[in-house]
Image: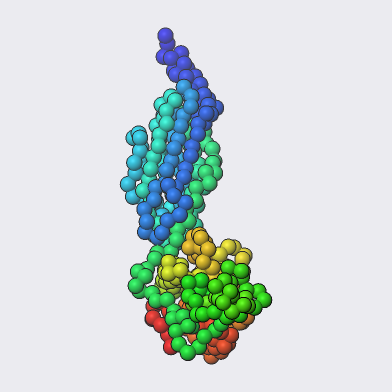
Amino acid sequence: MSTALLTLLLVLMVLAQGTLFRRRALKRLTYQRTFSTRTAFVGEQVDLVEIIANRKLLPLPWLKAESRLSTALVFGSTHTSAEETSLVSGNQGVAYHSSVFFLGPYSQVTRRHHVTPMRRGVFSAHSVSLTCGDLFGTNAAQQQLDTGAELIVYPRLLNEQDVSLPSSRDQGDLIVRRWIAPDPFLIQGIRPYRAGDAQRDVHWAATARTGSLQVKARDYTADPHLLVLLNVQRTVDQWGDLMDYEQQEIEQAISYAATLCLAALHAGVGAGFAANAPIVEGGGPVLMMPERAAGRDVEILEALARLRILRIRTMHAFLDDLIGITGLDIVVLTAYTDAWIEERLEALRRAGNTVSVRWPAQGDMP
């Protein structure tokens, strides 16, 4: 066989296998990417799991999965069921993650990347680009996938001993009746029946003794409700983006708010959160009135995870929107106060609320 003919045959073989890989490499190939958990706290390690399967006879000499991720997701070691190469690099908040696989016929590779989120937020790992090459690296087939992988990162929690719940309004001379509730276990005495009294409160022995319907008079206990109000402005004239150190102060306040709300819920107190910032693009200020329902902790943590540090309403105007509320313990987290803010806080107090002002970087403010 002449050299020319041999060279021609080799060229034809390279072209044929290249065409085969280009047309068939991504056929019957499945790729899945998920986080091992839907939610995590800042600093808590999770796994980013990749499962790729080749459901055909044709082997894949190399297959590369590439994606863009946030640099807030710090990658650690990787566990895999086959040899692999994994690379993470990037800057300016964007990391480029690349994994290279070899897949034999009818084979599957599962890979777990240890990931630690270093800040709160919602992090997407949706888009993945798959590139598969032939034996000689002369041809490549590409495919773009949307995996739906997403991780919601809650704020870092502080030590509950470092935050303090506000004193309830029933601790002192002032008692606000609409803020307290009858306790089913505390009975003051017996009184005549009044329209609207529940049948379960009827005291039948006293009724038989007096000849008229008598009911149990119950004592009252506190039913506190906490509203944590965050001001994302560092100064009264601040409007645009904050410097890194300023954002760190707001992040510390968000962690304080999360810890305070969870401490309240753990103590059986209804908790809510409000801020002059949105939780979605183009949304309005967040306002979650206090509740004590099951799953309330998750609702608040998810709102705080999604909260954007972007002032969309001045603190003065936001407080004006709250003037009508009553019967709450309100903790205001703000880096500053002025005469206008103090005037509105006093109006909230006159409406039957207790109001305290704090800033985690400085402690309680006068």
Seen at 54% across and 41% down, the residue is: 145
Relative side of 121 to 278, left or right: left
Task: Name the spot of residue 216 as percent of width and height, x first.
Answer: 55, 75
Residue 163 in the image: above or below residue 56? below
In the rendered image, the quadrant that contains the C terminus is bottom left
Task: Name the spot of residue 121 as percent of width and height, x first.
Answer: 48, 60
Residue 158 in the image: above or below residue 44? below
Please name the colour scheme applied to the rendered image: rainbow
In the image, 62 versus 48, the foreground residue is 48
Whether residue 342 is visible, yes or no, is yes
Identity of the residue furthest to the left in this view: 77
In the image, 351 versus 112, the foreground residue is 351
Residue 3 in the image: above or below residue 125? above
Seen at 37% across and 59% down, the residue is: 43
Residue 224 in the image: above or below residue 88? below
In the image, 106 versus 186, the foreground residue is 186
Task: Name the spot of residue 348 as percent of width and height, x first.
Answer: 56, 84
In the image, 20 versus 44, the foreground residue is 44
Seen at 51% across and 66% down, the residue is: 292
Task: Name the spot of residue 93 as percent of width and height, x first.
Answer: 45, 59
In the rendered image, the quadrant that contains the N terminus is top left
The image quadrant of residue 360 is bottom left
Identity of the residue furthest to the top in this view: 1
Whether residue 11 is visible, yes or no, is no
- How many tags in the picture? 0
Seen at 49% across and 37% down, the residue is: 31
The image quadrant of residue 94 is bottom left
Relative side of 299 to 86, left or right: right
